[in-house]
Image: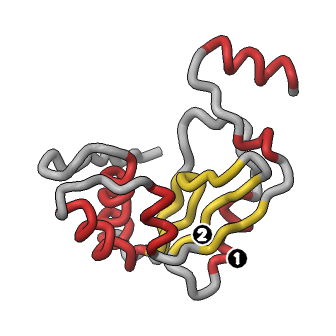
């Protein structure tokens, strides 16, 4: 398996959207239409997450997961065309929240019933608790 390591542009404000931007640039360079993102601290994500987001995206520039616990904006599918507005937003010197950027772009919200599937495990203890409750 071949891996590609992407680094955030150090001239941009740090944060998750800086990484998304690099991913969008990479995807465009590979002639892909979409980039998918998921947080590394969410080990129980649904196996059909990205298929459902792609099915729901329609003409929207992005689609992301929503549950009864709220929005999960990094569980998302992004059209590579978002590279331009995202880079413009970051070059303004401010790193917007992922939620606000997606709202501004009129991203499609996609409902998922199982909020637990999006639970975060930021520590070994939290991961163990999730595993025990499975």
Q: Residues within 10 Å of mark 2 (few under 14, many from 20)?
A: many
Tell me the quarter of the picture where residue 59 sits: bottom right
Q: Earlier in the sequence, mark 2 or mark 1?
A: 1
Report which residue position mark 1 lands on.
Answer: 56
Element marked by disc 2: strand
Q: Residue at x 52, y 54 (%)?
A: 37
Which residue is outermost to the left? 11
State the residue in front, 48 or 58. 58
Q: Is residue 27 above or below residue 122?
A: below
Q: CA distance from mark 2 to mark 1?
A: 7 Å
State the residue in front, 120 or 28. 120
In the picture, measured across the screen, residue 31 lies left or right of residue 48, that is left
Q: Residue at x 76, y 49 (%)?
A: 46
Residue 39 position in % (x across, y down): 54, 42
Report which residue position mark 2 lands on.
Answer: 63
Residue 55 position in % (x across, y down): 71, 76
Q: Residue at x 43, y 65 (%)?
A: 101
Element marked by disc 1: helix
Residue 127 position in % (x across, y down): 68, 20
Residue 47 position in % (x across, y down): 75, 51
| Quarter of the figure with the C terminus | top right
Task: Indicate the colouring scheme.
Answer: secondary structure
Asked whether disc 2 touches disc 1, contact meaning CB atoms under 8 Å apart, the reply is: yes
In the picture, measured across the screen, residue 2 lies left or right of residue 119, that is left
**Number of numbered discs:** 2
């Amino acid at each position: 398996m071949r891996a590609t390591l992407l680094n955030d542009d150090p001239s941009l404000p740090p944060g998750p959207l800086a990484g998304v931007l690099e991913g969008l640039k990479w995807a465009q360079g590979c002639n892909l239409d979409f980039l998918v993102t998921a947080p590394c601290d969410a080990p129980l994500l649904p196996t059909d997450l990205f298929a459902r987001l792609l099915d729901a995206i329609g003409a929207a520039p992005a689609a992301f997961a929503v549950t009864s616990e709220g929005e999960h904006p990094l569980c998302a599918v992004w059209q590579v065309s978002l590279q331009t507005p995202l880079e413009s937003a970051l070059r303004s010197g401010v790193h917007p929240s992922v939620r606000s950027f997606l709202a501004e772009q009129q991203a499609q919200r996609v409902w998922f019933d199982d909020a637990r599937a999006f639970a975060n495990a930021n520590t070994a203890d939290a991961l163990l608790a999730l595993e025990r409750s499975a």
